[in-house]
């Protein structure tokens, strides 16, 4: 069997990947519009990889305006066999402090008004996917072992509450998210994870906690604080990605 092509969707703080070489840029148009930017293909640690910056490069498309369907279709068109998403998130669970890496296992979707399915009776006929376990367990496990290989401590759990954004939450909203079981809060895992499932592409996420969620630390959440965590944190994320590639092929 030929090796798998691994797509990486970079989030806030990861609009370019330093690792891959022999890069080619692909400007893809899909029946559902343009993705957030060019998709780059290349070789990294012996694997064929695709990279797409979810918010564009430079970072400019807000979470609720991303054409998630075009992003997923573009990766499918270029032959993605596996998708690893990278998401910057807020931490709710006491173990999810700033700088922590986590491989989440569940999602609560609180987004609204986003084009969230291919099976809308227009692009494709109506269908209902199973989404009991939104992340692919095999890919999750490979990412966890890769983190170990790379010497990066990582949390092996996380229920991600996905909010609409782009504003951050109120403290009461975060209390609510905690009560309904969320450990992390982000803005972009949905509808991305569901669309990958609809296309039959195994999908998992590497989350980097970039701030304690609203009301979980003293004072306001500042972009400066987030940026400080992002720059060192994304190096750790990239180390996990690199180590995961031979395992995901
Ligand atoms: N809330 C939602 N999304 C986020 C956060 C947050 O606190 N931090 C980074 N992405």
Image: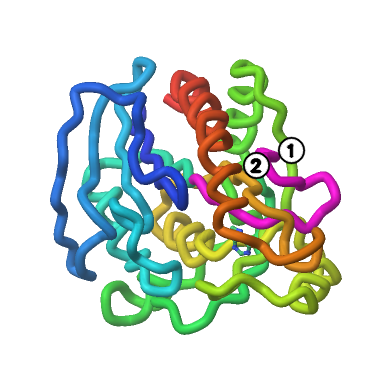
Mark 2 surroundings within 10 Å by alpha-carbon count, few (fewer than 14), some (14 through 19), many (20 or more): many
Quote the CA–CA distance across marks 2 and 1.
Answer: 6 Å
Secondary structure of the residue carrying numbered label 1: loop
12 or 180: nearer the eye? 12
Which image quadrant shows ligand 1? bottom right
Residue at the (58%, 36%) spot, across then down: 233
Q: Is residue 62 above or below residue 193?
A: below
Where is residue 58? Give x, y as percent.
Answer: 29, 53
- Compared to residue 152, the image places residue 32 above or below, namely below
Mark 2–mark 1 CB contact (< 8 Å): yes
Q: Is residue 112 magenta?
A: no
Q: Quadrant of residue 152?
A: top right
Q: Is residue 180 left or right of 242 when viewed as pictured? A: right
Q: Which residue is mark 1?
A: 155
The residue at the point 61 percent across, 54 percent down is: 89
**Percent position of residue 219, x then y:** 76, 65
Residue under numbered circle 2 = 103
216 and 124: which is toward the camera: 216
Q: Position of residue 32 (x, y in %)?
A: 23, 70
Q: Which residues are magenta?
A: 86-102
In the rendered structure, the answer to whether residue 139 lies left or right of residue 185 reads left
In magenta segment, residue 99? yes
Disc 2 secondary structure class:
loop
Picture quadrant of residue 145: top right
For image coordinates 63% across by 49% down, the residue present is 210
- Give the left or right position of residue 30, taking residue 214 as reference: left
| Residue drawn at point x = 74 percent, y = 44 percent | 157
Image quarter of the C terminus: top left
Q: Is mark 2 within 8 Å of ligand 1?
A: no
Q: Which residue is at the front of the view, 2 or 83?
A: 83
Q: Which numbered dot is residue 106?
A: none
Q: Residues within 10 Å of mark 1 (few under 14, many from 20)?
A: some
């Amino acid at each position: 069997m030929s090796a798998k092509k691994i797509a990486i969707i970079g989030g806030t703080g990861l609009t370019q990947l330093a690792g891959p070489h022999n890069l080619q840029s692909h400007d893809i148009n899909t029946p559902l519009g343009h993705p957030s930017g060019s998709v780059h293909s290349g070789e990294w640690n012996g694997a064929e990889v695709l990279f797409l910056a979810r918010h564009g490069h430079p970072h400019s498309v807000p979470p609720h305006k991303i054409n998630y369907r075009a992003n997923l279709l573009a990766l499918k068109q270029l032959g993605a066999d596996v998708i690893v998403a990278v998401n910057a998130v807020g931490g709710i669970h006491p173990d999810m402090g700033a700088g922590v890496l986590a491989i989440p296992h569940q999602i609560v979707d609180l987004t609204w008004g986003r084009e969230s399915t291919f099976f809308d009776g227009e692009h494709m006929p109506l269908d209902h996917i199973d989404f009991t376990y939104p992340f692919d367990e095999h890919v999750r496990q490979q990412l966890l072992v890769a983190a170990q290989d790379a010497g990066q401590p990582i949390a092996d759990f996380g229920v991600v509450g996905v909010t609409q954004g782009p504003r951050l939450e109120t403290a009461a909203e975060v209390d609510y998210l905690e009560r309904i079981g969320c450990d992390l809060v982000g803005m972009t895992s949905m509808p991305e994870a569901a669309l990958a499932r609809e296309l039959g592409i195994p999908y998992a996420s590497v989350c980097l906690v970039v701030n304690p969620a609203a009301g979980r630390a003293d004072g306001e959440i500042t972009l400066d604080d987030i940026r400080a965590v992002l720059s060192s944190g994304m190096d750790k994320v990239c180390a996990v990605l690199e180590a995961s590639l031979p395992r995901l092929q």
